[in-house]
Amino acid sequence: MVLVSGLVENYSKIGDIMSAEKCFRECLGLDNVVYTAMVCGYLWNGEFEKSKGVFMEMSSFRFELNEFTMTAVIGALFDVKEGEQIHAFGVKMGLLSNHLNNAVMNMYVRFDILEVMESQ
């Protein structure tokens, strides 16, 4: 899976999202690392809805959602309710590292909801 996630990441970084998608969809053994690479790949290429779709697919298959996956997807959110759900999930799962905390703060600032952060 390390090879596939590396290919997905590299194709995505050079803007070849079609090749990244092909590697992702043809992978015989998807795991949370490959899914996270595809979530990030879509984000880097401005495909926010596709990124959220892969994230939802990943969570429906019960793959481990970690701080890196959640940090990536929180950057694609356009709705504060979705962001609050991701934030709550991170709190519940004990995943609020500095990395994810910064992404959550940026999300709230983006939505101009500083009072929510201050109340916690």
Image (tube, rainbow, N blue to C red):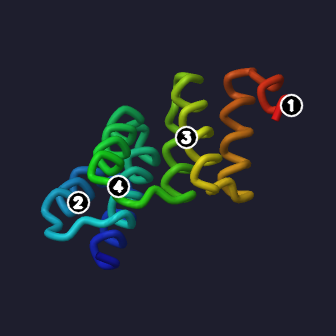
**CA–CA distance between discs 1 and 3?**
19 Å
Residue displayed at 57% across by 57% down: 67
Q: Residue at x 35, y 48 (%)?
A: 59
Q: Residue 29's x, y, as percent?
A: 19, 70
Q: Which residue lies at the image location 41% right of the left edge and 58% below the top edge?
A: 36
Residue 55 versus residue 8: which sits nearer the camera? 55
Q: Which mark is residue 38?
A: 4
**3D distance between C-alphas at marks 1 and 2:** 40 Å
**Three-letter amino acid code at disc 4?**
Met
- The quarter of the picture where residue 19 lies is bottom left
The tag on residue 24 is 2
Asked if the residues shown at circle 2 and circle 4 are in contact, with their CB atoms under 8 angstroms apart, the answer is: yes
Which image quadrant: the C terminus? Answer: top right
Residue type of the residue flagged with mark 1: Glu
Q: Are the residues at dot 1 and dot 2 in contact (C-beta closer than 8 Å)?
A: no
Q: Which disc number belongs to residue 74?
A: 3
Quadrant in the picture for the N terminus: bottom left
At label 3, counting other C-alpha atoms closer than 10 Å, the crowd grade (few under 14, some 14-19, many 20 or more) is many
C-alpha span from label 2 to label 3: 21 Å
Which residue is at the far right?
118
Give the left or right position of residue 85, taking residue 51 as reference.
right
Helix, strand or loop at label 2? It is helix
